Image (cartoon, grey):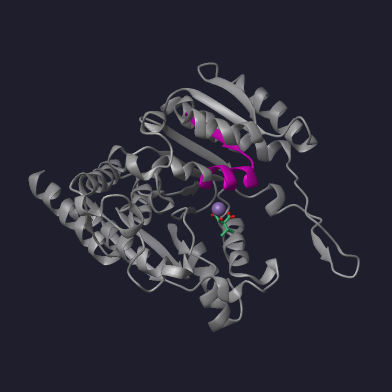
Amino acid sequence: MKLNLLVVAGDGIGPEVTNEAVAVLRQAMEGGGHELVVTEKRIGGIAIDTDGTPLPAETLEAALASDAVFLGAVGGTKWNALPPNTRPEAGLLKLRAALGGFANLRPAFAIKELAANSPLKAEVVAGADILFVRELLGGLYFGSPRAWDKAAGEAWNTMRYTRDEIIRVARIAFELAQKRGKKLTSVDKANVLEVSQLWRATVTEVAADYPDITLEHQLVDSMAMLLMTSPRNYDVVLTENLFGDILSDESAVITGSLGMLPSATIGGKINLYEPIHGSAPDIAGKSLANPLGAIMTAALVLRHSAGLEAEAALIETAVRKVLEAGYRTADLARGNTTDFKVLSTTEMGQQVRATIAAQLAHS
Ligand code: IPM
Ligand code: MN
């Protein structure tokens, strides 16, 4: 198969991790006799500096003409003073809306080799394997009215959902639960918010079509605690946009580093792939960033946009093997560093590719 991928590497460590991920993606595809065609465009702060807008028309056109979009990261201290609608992040939100993907899949899983990296006790995280399904196109991020009335000293955003928006994302979550542990936890704040009451009622209604799935509801505040005390109790976790943003970052401590985790946004015209970490401006340009989250994201491109499950698994296995062999980036090398071989961003990418090459040679 042939995949036309638009790469928008963005800001900070975005370009560094994206380079490694795309090289791994190319190797895995070409190794299986497939073709990867990459187009690169600007997004985020770099696009503000060059084009005067965080999502240039050219980038949007290329995105809509692609089979899938891969994003590195957007944002940085340089653009922090800008208002929300002109910031680097606004470019990403516009891109998300244009591509139409409403179901953001964010796994959070324990990795045995990284157990010491988690601040949680090893016996609490061991075996944890959660998949967040975060609604991505609704809620406070997109609801109107929204404004900051400076003269009045007042600002407001709107958490708004329609039944249809809840139904479509809930269906994806139930279907994923069917392929996993058959348990779905829906998160809301139904003790306070009308929008959450609609959310809970609608998810309960959808559940009737999935009798094989055990559905439970949790309030978001209590869920924030339960994810840390008993992460193994959760399989698929369905949330609205902002709750999912918060809980998925929180749950990265199960894995031990935000730098390890991938995401895929599906359900729309064109899927969007992004590691869940940000642009980390403090370490940008130093080859210190962990490219494994971006590399795991490349595996999701193969799984969800190319139908290449074997190639996706090849990448995920290679990441495990590299960790098993003691290779770490700086973020993962806490504790007794003499046990580890600490690699730069590019060296870690090379190590993963060498491992894939060895696997391909054996197959
Ligand atoms: C994420 C990020 C984004 C979000 C920002 C950069 C707009 O935090 O992907 O989690 O809030 O969705
Ligand atoms: Mn976030």
Which stretch is magenta?
A: 235-249
**Residue 347 rendering spot, x and y as whole percentages:** 23, 64
Residue 143 is inside the magenta segment: no
Residue at 45%, 67% in the rendered image: 8
Q: Nearer the viewer, residue 272 or 351?
A: 351
Q: Nearer the viewer, residue 134 or 348?
A: 348
Q: Nearer the viewer, residue 350 or 337?
A: 337
Residue at 70%, 70% in the rendered image: 83
Examine the image and state in which quarter residue 18 appears.
Answer: bottom left
Q: Nearer the viewer, residue 262 or 26?
A: 262
Apparent side of residue 35 relative to residue 362 in the rendered image (left or right): right
Apparent side of residue 10 relative to residue 318 in the rendered image (left or right): right
Residue at 43%, 39% in the rendered image: 254
Q: Quadrant of ligand 1?
A: bottom right
In the displayed structure, 244 sits above or below 150; it is above
Does the image show residue 102?
no
**Residue 322 rendering spot, x and y as whole percentages:** 21, 49
Residue at 87%, 64% in the rendered image: 153
Residue found farthest to the right = 152
**Residue 219 rendering spot, x and y as whole percentages:** 66, 31
> Quarter holding the C terminus?
top left
**Residue 213 rendering spot, x and y as whole percentages:** 52, 20
Name the magenta segment's main secondary structure.
Answer: helix
